[in-house]
Image: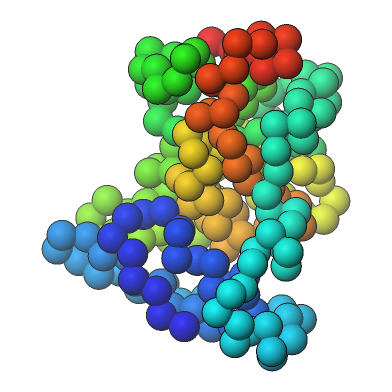
Amino acid sequence: MCVFDTSCSVRGCTGLFCGWSQVSLHFVTSTHTHTHTHTHTTNTPASEKNNVFFNSREVYPQLRCNASYVRALLPLLKSQGVGGVQNKIQLIDARGKVQFDGSEVRAARGGRIPHSVNVPYKVLINDTAGGYLPLAEMRERLHRRNVSVPSLTTGDTVLYCNGGVASTAVLFALFLLGAPLCTMANYDGSWGEWGNQSDDNGFPVEL
């Protein structure tokens, strides 16, 4: 399966989760086309692999979560503290730094979900050639931001951005680095939902 995308998000990466054995991603910039090929095997039946109506909500429901799921993680995040690559639970904000620190506001409220770690998706992208950075460099950049690659022995890693799109780029990078899909979830509503709530108790904000 070949996917062409003019952005650095992974809207086109759904095919990898459909069960195709090989996906070739072509990230197109104004001057370059960067190709990344990844081989992945799943137990998806052949009949589902060819189904153009593939529904990721049904095949991989754990990849998506809602606000209630995120709220349930907040006490656990608070108890373990923020920072340090040994964190068992991670909440990753894939927006830019100015939105993360609240100086740029794109919702009714500015700031971030408490105990989030900022990993703007662009820090994992090759600015010159397009596409992802080499795996070793991505791992190092995540390490510098106190983010570890989830494993079956760690807790959940939840990701969000403004609308649940840019965060998938970070999720897919973690997957390329070896994180099992069952350890990660993308918060669909993201800041577009959380930041527009007036209930500071149910939807707390950190600056």
Quarter location, residue 93:
top right
- Tell me where residue 206 appears, x and y as whole percent: 59, 12
**Res. 58 in view:** yes
Seen at 36% across and 54% down, the residue is: 8
In percent of width and height, residue 37 lies at: 46, 77
- Foreground pick, 152 / 159: 159
Where's residue 50, x and y in %? Answer: 59, 87
Residue reaching furthest to the left:
31
- In this rendering, would 55 be left or right of 93? right
35 relative to 149, above or below:
below
Q: How is the image coloured?
A: rainbow
Depth check: 104 or 34 in front? 104
**Residue drawn 45% across the image and 65% down it:** 12
In this view of the protein, which residue sits in the foreground, 207 or 147?
207
| Residue located farthest toward the front when viewing the structure as drawn | 53
- Is residue 87 at all visible to an observer of this figure? no
Instruction: Establish if 136 lies above or below 188.
Output: below
Q: Quadrant of residue 61?
A: bottom right
Query: On the picture, is 9 further left or further right than 182?
Result: left
Q: Residue at x 15, y 60 (%)?
A: 30
Residue 80 vertical position relative to residue 39 in the rendered view, above or below:
above
Residue 183, above or below 119: below
**Image coords of residue 193 (percent x, y):** 57, 28
In the foreground, 165 or 159 = 165
Q: How many marks?
A: 0
